[in-house]
Image (spheres, rainbow, N blue to C red):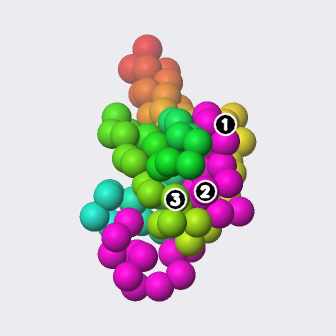
Amino acid sequence: MKLDQVKKGQMLKIILMPDEKIRSQAIRFGIAEGEIVTCFEVIPSGPIILQKNRQEIAIGRRLAAQIEVEPIPARSFNPFRRWTANALSRSKQTS
């Protein structure tokens, strides 16, 4: 799926940027292959607004049409899962 085909609210993994020019443009916006982002907004005939951490990034349609992404089910990605598991493990050891 291409980035210009995503829907608002979808979590995405950036899979492929086909050439060096597109890769360098995307890196300037703070995204690279392997990054997990959320589609914050889709402006009709306008940019795709992505959210990465607390930053919002507007990607133009032409650039978005060249970036391959993979939708991620929201339940499968939890950046706090590892932290929570480690915190629970530590609290059991101390008590």
Question: Mark 2 and mark 3 in contact (Cβ < 8 Å)?
Answer: yes
Q: Determine whether the residue tagged by mark 1 lies in a helix, strand or loop.
A: helix
Task: Residue 1: name its quadrant.
Answer: bottom right
Q: In which quarter of the image is residue 9?
A: top right
Local packing at callout 1 (Cα closer than 10 Å; few below 14, some 14-19, many 20+) is few
N-term mark: 1 or 3: 3
Three-letter code, disc 1: Ala
Q: For mark 3, does the 10 Å Cα neighbourhood hold few (<14), some (14 to 19), or many (20 or more) residues?
A: some
Quadrant showing the C terminus: top left
Mark 2 against mark 1, which lies toward the viewer?
2
- Mark found first going from the N terminus, 2 or 1: 2
Residue 74: which numbered mark, if any? 1
Query: Outermost residue toward the top?
Result: 95
Q: Position of residue 90 (x, y in %)?
A: 42, 28
Query: Residue 61 has which mark?
Result: 3
Q: Position of residue 57 (x, y in %)?
A: 37, 47
User: What type is the residue that disc 3 sits on?
Assistant: Arg
Query: Is residue 64 located in the magenta-colored stretch of the structure?
Result: no
